[in-house]
Amino acid sequence: MKQRLNRILVTGGAGFLGSHLCDRLVEQGHDVICVDNFFTSQKHNITHLIGKPNFELIRHDITHPLWLEVDEVYNLACPASPVHYQYNPIKTTKVSVVGAINVLGLGKRCKAKVFQASTSEVYGDPDIHPQPESYRGNVNPIGVRACYDEGKRAAETLFFDYHRSNGVNIRVVRIFNTYGPRMHPYDGRVVSNFILQALRDEDITLYGDGSQTRSFCYVDDLIEGFIRMMNGPDDFIGPVNLGNPDEFTIKELAQIVIELTGAKSKLTYMPMPDDDPTQRQPDIALAKKRLDWQPTIKLRDGLVKTIEYFKSIDLNSFRQPTDHTAHKSSERG
Ligand code: NAD
Ligand code: UDP
């Protein structure tokens, strides 16, 4: 059966995940509108799409209302790395909350389906493991990560209230750590930091003793999950976990990156950031059952592709790091 072609808004469409999503939707023939204020991205990620007849770019901040006619909205606009979301924490909460109100209002007016990129951070520092969707989380509401965690939790509340009160057709996914080409080289996330450090034979910065864990999903797997969720049945609105359940300590990740790059880097230990979750692994039983989805790309294979990407880019064309422990260690001279 021929797929229906839609007019689709992607907020945060120039970011790491947003640009991969725009690629997929443009390739499928949809009419794609990418909205971004370039807070944590640059045109770099979407340059190849500019000029295509079914791609449109609008510079706009989603904390202000936007008036468009669309069939679907993927709401991804929000700084995602701790370095970026803690840079202006009040703005971070505003993007999640006011941004959600704006896209949901648009969805209500246009009768559009609205997708929310939520996060494993709604579980905070989890005391059950792995984390199923039914777990209500352990978030410190006044800590340094709260602007993001609580902002995303409030956004989920808004999505479900617009659904219950106004009949908006919603989809909510909780994304676990995802990596791949087009991550911003200076956003301080662990995968980009370690690869850049390794490619320069610099010390690899482990926060704490490196025993905290994360489960890393390659971007292509995640985008497949997004599309399946958006196009799935209307009685399955989420929230659903999307992530790769293969769990690694941060120290193991550092060792794999050193091995794959052949770097001469040593490990160096730095203070643990406040409220850094000690363990994280998605329970993806629900996604398997309802979306027939599970990741297919192993960490080492995904890292090889990501390393190739970081080797290929001209770092001088990216905005320079801001003042942060993660950045200090990767700043040149
Ligand atoms: P990213 O920083 O690369 O992308 C976010 C994009 O949103 C950027 O292009 C940024 O400029 C844009 N943006 C920020 N504030 C905006 C605003 N006010 N108006 C318009 N655009 C704005 O991060 P990402 O990894 O691509 O994350 C995308 C979404 O997925 C985010 O909502 C994030 O919270 C969520 N998420 C990502 C991960 C992950 O591991 N990558 C994990 C959990 C959740
Ligand atoms: N981390 C680290 N060194 C770095 C960057 C991050 O040890 O240079 C750790 C960080 O403390 C956390 C994990 O790696 O435990 C993942 O950090 P990231 O910022 O990528 O994402 P998070 O899952 O914490 O949002």
Image (cartoon, helix red, strand yellow):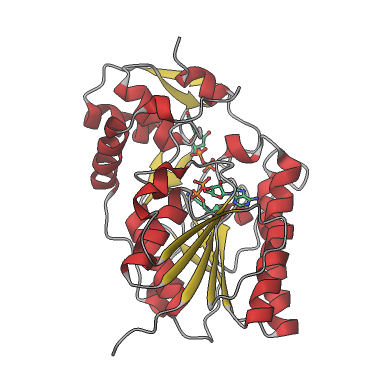
Above/below status of 139 relative to 234: above
Q: Residue at x 44, y 14 (%)?
A: 332
Image quadrant holding the C terminus, namely top left
Quarter holding the N terminus? bottom left
Residue 40 lies, in percent from the top left, at 55, 41
Say if residue 88 shows up in the picture.
yes
- Residue 132 visible (yes or no): no
Q: Nearer the viewer, residue 264 or 278?
A: 264
| 215 is higher (above) or lower (below) than 159 | above
Q: Identify which residue is drawn at 39% across, 31% down.
A: 251
Between 55 and 259, the one lying in front of the other is 55
Where residue 205 sits, quadrant-wise, is top left
Q: Is residue 151 left or right of residue 207?
A: right
Residue 215 percent location from the top left of the image: 42, 49
Residue 269 percent location from the top left of the image: 48, 19
Residue visible at 25% across and 37% down in the picture: 308
Q: Residue 102, percent across and down?
A: 70, 65
198 to 231, vertically: above or below: above
Q: Quadrant of residue 69?
A: bottom right
Q: Residue at x 26, y 16 (%)?
A: 264
Q: Quadrant of residue 63?
A: bottom right
Is 68 on the left or on the right of 241, as rendered? right
